[in-house]
Image (cartoon, helix red, strand yellow):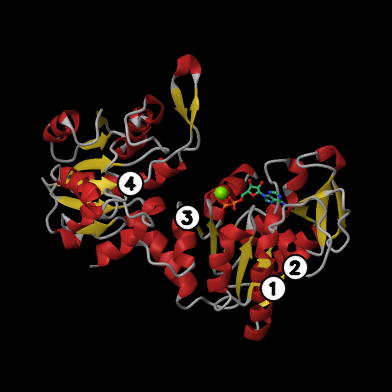
Amino acid sequence: MGSYTGLGEIAGKRVLVRSDLNVPLKDGAAGVREIGDDGRIRASVPTIRALAEAGARVVVTAHLGRPDGAPDAKYSLAPVAQRLGELLGQPVAFATDTVGPSAQETVAGLADGQIALLENVRFNPGETAKDDAVRAAFAAELAALADAFVSDGFGVVHRKQASVYDVAQLLPHAMGGLVRAEIDVLRRLTDTPERPYAVVLGGSKVSDKLGVIDNLLGKADTLLIGGGMVFTFLKAQGHEVGKSLLEEDQIPTVLEYLARAKANGVEIVLPTDIVVADSFGDEASARVVAATEIPADSVGLDIGPESGAAFGKVVEASRTVFWNGPMGVFEQPAFAEGTRAVAAALTKVEGLSVVGGGDSAAAVRALGFADDQFGHISTGGGASLEYLEGKELPGITVLES
Ligand code: ADP
Ligand code: MG
């Protein structure tokens, strides 16, 4: 739990908390929207509960999906208010607007220790406005609802948005416990990682992860490459990759990374075998081939068993491991074994093991691993990647000023 000492006595004060409650919603019975994975709501509970227990009047603001800066029933936080209340074990008053009459009335009605959730903050165009003045004006309306601000939405701290960035300039502010925990882990990955330090990267596109590779080439001992980005590396080394995912335009960058890794003494490990199929998702035709002999008419969808074992060995022997991006199309059993091998090895790391990225976190859960088998599962894919790229996170910088 973070410390809120910077805020002084919070009992009786209205504390605005920016949480990340952006959970997947699906259509349920009778057209009611139902919550899929509620992991982000669960992760937000400790900070909200701690503030309520300290006697604050807690006003939670959050977004859901990408509405167009106007109310849209599809993206209402109403079902989230319900679930949040269940998880907290106390009712959560729901305001049907962001800063309007309902928000003002709901906040005014809070007693010490009570909690309210404001409607989707992205229903107001000021939240994500590029125009600083428009954002600041909306932030002032949010700030008028509270006496202090706690930033706890790690998934949005890389965004310069009204409820993340601007509002912190208007109120006494503090880092929430969730954001503090995430930042502490990321600092351990970048400042003084215990060695050996391995980074496992996969997922769909190499272009999504270039910044991370670039920055971690100076820090990690070993970089293990899997997922769709493998094929751009293999192609760069002159191999046939068939119909596999390929980003031709990234080949020069990849070649530069391979050269720099060599110069820095960083080992880049590529898979030696690949699970291919006749077409994307065709499980019936799945078979293992050498990574250097991918047939021209096939598509690579996972790292092979030999590679899974080799990657696992490096991971297990490391004292610090950061993993982002599934090793294959884990959504289908025939292409999930590479991801399973890496996940299993990660659970055996003596030291710090971190899973980052939305799909990677979903993958370990879908494959039956429990969250507590890993040192840390990050709640914010984009934010943790930007941090590891060495970029400044506006939502963190503003809290430190
Ligand atoms: P994360 O959200 O953890 O950062 P990404 O979004 O980068 O991960 O990538 C996840 C997706 O990558 C998954 O949906 C998975 O199916 C896909 N993927 C993994 N390997 C391949 C591959 N060889 N070809 C195509 N897609 C792949
Ligand atoms: Mg993803």
Q: Give the label, 3 or 1, closer to the camera.
A: 1
Tell me which label, 3 or 4, sits earlier in the chain.
4
Tell me which label, 1 or 2, sits earlier in the chain.
2
- Asked where in the image residue 393 lies, by quadrant, the reply is bottom left
Which numbered circle lies on residue 255? 1
Q: Give the distance between the C-alpha atoms of the residues marked 1 and 4, in whole angstroms.
A: 37 Å
Tell me which label, 1 or 4, sits earlier in the chain.
4
Which residue is at the front of the view, 24 or 1? Answer: 24
Is disc 1 in contact with disc 2, using a CB cutoff of under 8 Å? yes
Which residue is outermost to the top? 30
Q: Is residue 333 left or right of residue 207?
A: right
Tell me which label, 3 or 2, sits earlier in the chain.
2
- Residue highlighted by disc 2: 236
Q: Amino acid at mark 4?
A: Thr
Is disc 2 in contact with disc 4, using a CB cutoff of under 8 Å? no
Give the class, few, some or many, for how many residues have Cα within 10 Å of label 2's Cα (few <14, many ≥20): some
Residue located at (14% from left, 34% from top): 104
- Residue highlighted by disc 3: 382
Q: Give the label, 3 or 4, closer to the camera.
A: 4
